[in-house]
Image (cartoon, rainbow, N blue to C red):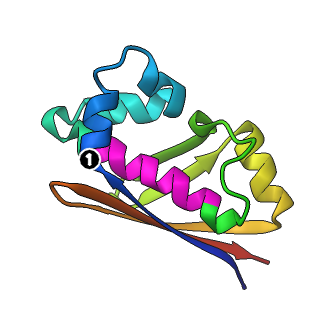
Amino acid sequence: MILGIGLDVVHVKRLEHWMEIPGLLERFFHPEELSAALRKGAGATLSLAARFAAKEAFGKALGIGLRGITLKNILVVNNHNGKPCMTLFGNARDAFLKSRGVNIHLSLTHESDNALAMVVIEGG
């Protein structure tokens, strides 16, 4: 049963600006996300924009937004096949469990100007 669906778009220039502000990325992204994205060189901004969109889409799928959720407690990485996966920690995990979610389905895409993410939360 689908409990919630969230969709978000992030303008890539927003992340380009954030990358210039010391310490800001560490506030919003899990260390593993940052490490994986920064290894992509010129593609880092697109990668981070898509991951930030995923975090926003997750809040929308929960139906409560991101109020009370620490963004770096939402880890978005690609598995060995390239499929994006979301792992939750701390207050993000608590909010997901409170929603009675069982699975998170995630899709990411990006172009030169925009990054989009869709999250579907499935219940038992």
Instruction: Name the residue located 42 percent from the left edge and 58 percent from the top edge.
Output: 84
Q: For the N terminus, which image quadrant? A: bottom right
Q: Is residue 93 above or below residue 18?
A: below
Quarter of image, res 47 = top left
Secondary-structure class at tag 1: helix
Q: For the C terminus, which image quadrant? A: bottom right
Pinpoint residue 54: horizontal percent, then vertical percent.
48, 55
Pinpoint residue 102: horizontal percent, then vertical percent.
73, 68
Q: Which residue is mark 1?
A: 12
Number of other residues with Cα within 10 Å of mark 1, as a class: few under 14, some 14 to 19, many 20 or more: many
Q: Nearer the viewer, residue 102 or 12?
A: 12
Residue interval drawn in magenta: 47-59
Quarter of image, res 109 = bottom left
Q: Is residue 63 above or below residue 68?
A: below
In-image side of 65 versus 52 (left or right):
right
SS assignment for the magenta stretch, majority: helix
Instruction: Name the residue located 41 percent from the left edge and 53 percent from the top edge.
Output: 79
**Residue 60 painted magenta:** no
Pinpoint residue 24: horizontal percent, then vertical percent.
44, 23
Outermost residue, top direction?
A: 22
**Count of numbered marks:** 1
Pinpoint residue 34: horizontal percent, then vertical percent.
39, 30
In-image side of 97 versus 77 (left or right):
right
